[in-house]
Image (cartoon, rainbow, N blue to C red):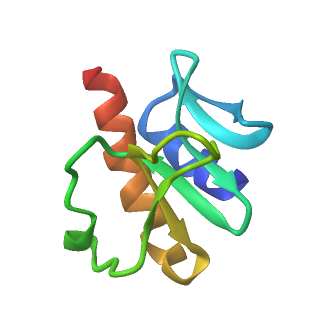
Amino acid sequence: MNDLFMKMKLIDDQVEMGKMMSCDGLTYHGKVFCFEYKDKMVFKLGKGYDIKKHGIEEFEYLNPFKNKGPMMAWFEVKDHYADKYESLAKVALEVMKGA
């Protein structure tokens, strides 16, 4: 997470470390746009985002609640795709800036 943080901080100095569901994450103006969750990274890319254009075939939508449906704007991506984390974080940051 620290390596990704440093890369994102170079892109925008308003990126900070933060927490989401007690997990380490990255924030922009106090709002989390990506975070570590179990053995995955989770990115807020927006509902309907085509994550497959990054070459990611395996992903899940974040679903932390037993009695609610998944959060379709948040994508869980396994370590297998760690080489894609930086590009996904950049997209998530841009999405957050546009919110």
Residue name at image x 55 percent, y 83 percent: 80
Name the quadrant containing residue 19. Answer: top right
Q: Is residue 35 left or right of residue 49?
A: right
Answer above or below: position of 48 versus 11: below
Q: Position of residue 69 (x, y in %)?
A: 46, 44
Quadrant in which the C terminus is drawn: top left
**Percent position (x, y) of residue 75?**
43, 55
- The residue closer to the viewer here, 31 or 17, is 31
Q: Nearer the viewer, residue 8 or 58?
A: 58
Residue 11: give x, y in percent of width and height: 42, 40
Whether residue 7 sits left or right of residue 40 in the image: it is left
Which residue in the rendered view is the most extreme toward the right? 22
Residue at image position (48%, 64%) is 85
Q: Please, is residue 26 above or below residue 85 in the view?
A: above
Quadrant where the N terminus sits is bottom right
Residue reaching furthest to the front: 67
- Residue 92 is left or right of residue 14, and the answer is left
Residue at x 53%, y 53% (from the top left corner): 42
